[in-house]
Image (cartoon, grey):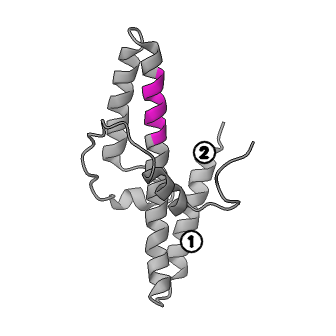
Amino acid sequence: MPTNYPETLSTAELASAANREPTNGDDTRQPEKPHSPKSDSANGPLLPETFTQECRSRWDNIQAGFVDEPRVAVQRADEMVADAIKKLAETFAAERNKLEQQWDRGDNVNTEDLRLALQKYRSFFNRLLSV
């Protein structure tokens, strides 16, 4: 199945491609609060708590609306999943960008920072590929 993605794709490229997508005009989300230190751990939450709470609330509304408008409910569920994927890509891209800025300045990124970043990727893949 052909795709429009290059052979290799970074989270930054994915997040920037998602930002170019047109929106449906109903984006009323509040700005995100900074991540807590707990969310930066490899096994911590993948998404900011405020975004997660918003998604749960949206999901409740989607489910409640299914009886009256099942097609609309499925469309809204798809939009919510797309928003979550976009936010996840943006989160990983922001973390990678921090490391790249250090490299661009000529700063040495310590092995511990790189180890933690790799652990977060591993944790994500383990969650994503779990059955």
Q: Nearer the viewer, mark 2 or mark 1?
A: 2
Q: Is residue 122 left or right of residue 102?
A: right
Q: What residue is drawn where x is 68% and y is 48%?
A: 3
Q: Amino acid at mark 1?
A: Arg
The picture places residue 45, in percent across and down from the top left corner, at 44, 50
Residue stretch rendered in magenta on the structure? 74-82
The residue at which mark 1 appears reads as 115
Q: What residue is drawn where x is 38% and y is 9%?
A: 68
Q: Is residue 47 left or right of residue 121?
A: left
Label pair 2/1, CB-CB below 8 angstroms: no
Q: Which secondary structure is most common in the magenta stretch?
A: helix
Q: Quadrant of the N terminus?
A: top right
Q: Secondary structure at mark 2?
A: helix
Q: What residue is drawn where x is 45% and y is 66%?
A: 95
Q: Amino acid at mark 2?
A: Leu
The residue at which mark 2 appears reads as 128
